[in-house]
Image (cartoon, grey):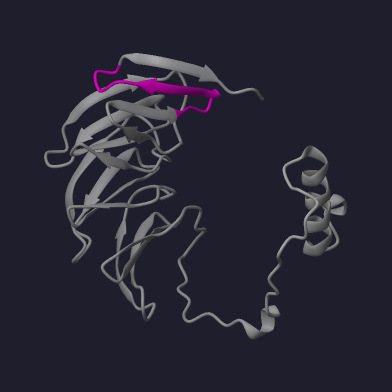
Amino acid sequence: YNAADRFASAADMKETMISVARKTGILSTQAIATTTISPSNSIKPIWTFKCEDEIRRTASYDNCTIYIGAYDNNLYAVNATSGEFLWKHATEGGVVSKPAIFDRNIFFGSEDHRLYVLSPRSGSIVWTYYADGPIRSSPYISEHHVFIGADDNHLHVVNVNSGRRALKFNSGAPIRSTPIVYQDSVYFGSESGEFFCIDFQGKVKWQIRAKR
């Protein structure tokens, strides 16, 4: 990456992208509606909250509370209206997993190899589940099970109530994508460029390899 190769402004980048899109047929030559954004010095945050290290993943919202993980090893709960600190739960690794909320509990993974389930009231542990590698995937909840990948090359399927593993599928490479479930199929990608569709028994229905 060379900083000198950057566009001089956002407007220059926009014009170049529109020109390319028109040449490829993605956009017609008709006028494109634009919106003027106010200068940055006129936009002020309603509130800010500072963590102790980097934030690398999306926050989640539930019941007027923002849940966000950080590389300071904590999951934070912050009042969505005021930005007031409510509580934090310390793990033993960076938290880059987007929290999922289900049945009023908070589910997320940590680089300390654990899937955590916390109570929203105080951040106390409901249960934890251990993988054999850092968890940088985000949980997806369906059919009363948590679907989450890990750097141990496996997709883990865990019962939401008991924390017991129902399935462990070896993809052959770390799984950092967020799985999705539709009907009786589970879809996810791995760091090797493979994209899988498996059933609830862990049998591969199909898989494809992304072109690099």
- Outermost residue, left direction? 162
**Can see residue 1?**
no
Up the image or down, 1 lies above or below 58; here it is above
**Can see residue 103?**
yes
Residue drawn at 48 percent across, 76 percent down: 48
Q: Quadrant of the N terminus?
A: top right
The verdict on residue 132 being magenta is no
Q: Quadrant of the C terminus?
A: top right
Up the image or down, 69 lies above or below 131; here it is below
- Position of 163 with respect to 131 (left or right) is left
Up the image or down, 115 lies above or below 181; here it is below
Residue drawn at 32 percent across, 57 percent down: 90
Question: How many marks do you count on the picture?
Answer: 0
Front-most of residues 129 and 73: 129
The residue range painted magenta reads 189-202
- Position of 160 with respect to 131 (left or right) is left
